[in-house]
Amino acid sequence: MEPAHSITALQYVALIHEISYTKVCKEIGLTPQQFSDWVKKRRPIPRERLHSIARYFDIEPALLIDEQHYLQDLTADLKIDLQILFLNKLVQQAEEGSDIEAFEEKLIRLQHKKAQQGLINRFTAVIQQNDVQTTQLCEAFLDQIQSGNLSALQQAINPSEEGD
């Protein structure tokens, strides 16, 4: 999956929490150079530092790093997941009469967006297999949907429903 932006998951988490990188560094005992090295992927994040950062933002460490312990690039999927986590925390911490309803509405929109992104990812994975027949089927499927010919498509998918 291609990155949605040219930033890392850690940078995005700081952004949505509206916390400067400098403040993060001061509060968990990092140097700005360490932070910069991780963001630029010059070196992996040591396990103990990763856990400090994860505790600071109250998120799972695995959301921040890849398999080699380098910061993960922000993908569309990860961005949505991080937004959902952040909004869930806001809802939990919100006081009576605050913007809980607005947060919950945003969460519903994000869940819908996550489902859409899942479909996009599945379709992308199928197309990237570079199988001619599969690509032709995908094109035919999209042509039928875009032309509004849903009944023909429905019959092709479920031929037993023809008489309904």
Image (tube, helix red, strand yellow):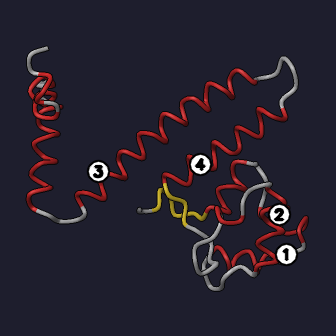
101, above or below 3, in the image: above
Residue type highlighted by circle 1: Leu
Question: Quick one: SS at disc 3?
Answer: helix
Q: Nearer the viewer, residue 104 or 16?
A: 104
The amino acid type, in three-letter code, at marker 2 is: Val
Relative to 152, 22 lies left or right:
right
Query: Which residue: 41% across, 62% down?
Result: 1
State which tag comes first along the sequence, 3 or 4.
4
Q: CA distance from mark 3 to mark 1?
A: 41 Å
Residue occupying image coordinates x 85% and y 61%? 23
- Residue 16 at what x, y percent from top left? 69, 48
**Disc 4 from disc 2: Cα separation:** 21 Å
- Asked whether disc 1 touches disc 2, contact meaning CB atoms under 8 Å apart, the reply is yes
Numbered disc in front, either 3 or 1: 3
Q: Which residue is mark 3?
A: 123
Name which of mark 3 and mark 1 comes first in the sequence: 1
Residue type highlighted by circle 4? Asp
Q: Mark 3 or mark 2, which is nearer the start of the sequence?
A: 2
Residue position for label 2: 24
Q: How far across and how far down the image is residue 45, in percent?
A: 71, 79
Q: CA distance from mark 4 to mark 1?
A: 26 Å
Residue tagged 1: 30
Depth check: give the residue in front, 160 or 142: 160
Q: Nearer the viewer, mark 4 or mark 1?
A: 4
Q: Label 3 to label 4, Cα distance in Å?
A: 20 Å
